[in-house]
Amino acid sequence: MHLDVLDLRQFYYRTRLGRVAQAAIRDGMLSLWPKAQGETVAGFGFAVPLLRPYLADAERVVGLMPGPQGVMPWPAGMPNISVLCDERSWPLETGSVDKLVVLHGLETSETPASLLAECWRVLATGGRGLFVVPNRAGLWTRRDGTPFGYGRPYSLGQLEAQLSDHGFVNERHASALFTPPSEKRFWLRSTAACEKLGQYLPARFAGGVFLVEVSKHVQEPTYADRATRLRRPLQVLEGIPASGVKPI
């Protein structure tokens, strides 16, 4: 169900509506993650349009693109940092990523459980993930001419439940793409106003996409304090009459 990388590139970089969508989602991401200085940032699916703000300060930025989608060199005019990979096995070390962005990856995946397991594996303890998925109640999922009209759209509750089931801790959520998916000049010029006003509307219904931030926490096993456990030692002969016990 993955879209072709050429279609995604055409939409985000060659159409006015795609540039509007790119800017709106990127601004939503930056409101949650304004910087990534000295961190390792990875994007999966077709997340590269969102990663450019981190190129200057992050220690490392990697764009991971699934095999069925295809890969394109990115960023333009700079050394390539994008790579083609199996969505179930990424060429990254366990616990090596501080920030992970998933765009057009989860809703189009044929093996979402395996994908989420890989996301969890590569995140560092305390690392953060951001999943950007189409809102099933939004207008953008009804427009086949955009990438948000493909795959499985989610409600906020469905998305948070799925992420929680795979070991993530849901931290925050936001919405973006309040602008109607229209090529009409009026709406394209009204993007900034629509996005600003949209922040006051119910997140579950208004936006075209959800942005759900999660964290990875690995808790150490908890053991009862030894003194507490030995406060009342086990009585192996408890309940046997004293007269019936002979010393060994």
Image (cartoon, grey):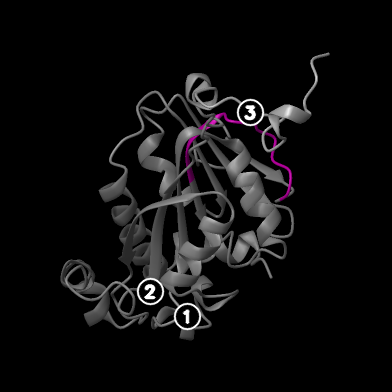
Q: Is residue 2 visible?
A: yes
Badge 1, how many Cα within 10 Å: few under 14, some, many 20+?
A: many
Identify the magenta region.
Answer: 88-100
Query: Mark 1, mark 3: which one is toward the viewer?
Result: 3
What is the quadrant of the N terminus in the image?
bottom right
Amino acid of disc 3: Leu
**x then y, percent, for residue 73:** 60, 43
Residue 208: give its label.
Answer: 2
Q: What residue appears at the point 68 percent right and 38 percent down from the top-left corner?
A: 239
Does the magenta portion include 91? Answer: yes
Badge 3, how many Cα within 10 Å: few under 14, some, many 20+?
A: few
User: Label 2 near label 1: C-beta < 8 Å?
Assistant: yes
First-in-chain label (1 vs 2): 1
Q: What residue appears at the point 50 percent right and 64 percent down from the top-left corner?
A: 161
Does the magenta portion include 83? Answer: no
First-in-chain label (3 vs 2): 2
70 relative to 157, above or below:
above
Q: Distance between the residues labelled 3 and 2?
A: 61 Å
Badge 2, how many Cα within 10 Å: few under 14, some, many 20+?
A: many
Residue 234: give its label.
Answer: 3
Q: How far apart are marks 1 and 2 (CA)?
A: 7 Å
Q: Is the magenta stretch mostly helix, strand or loop?
A: loop
The residue where tag 1 is placed is 141
First-in-chain label (1 vs 3): 1
**x then y, percent, for residue 96:** 56, 29
Q: What residue appears at the point 52 percent right and 35 percent down from the top-left corner?
A: 218
**x then y, percent, for residue 104:** 55, 62
Q: SS at mark 1?
A: helix
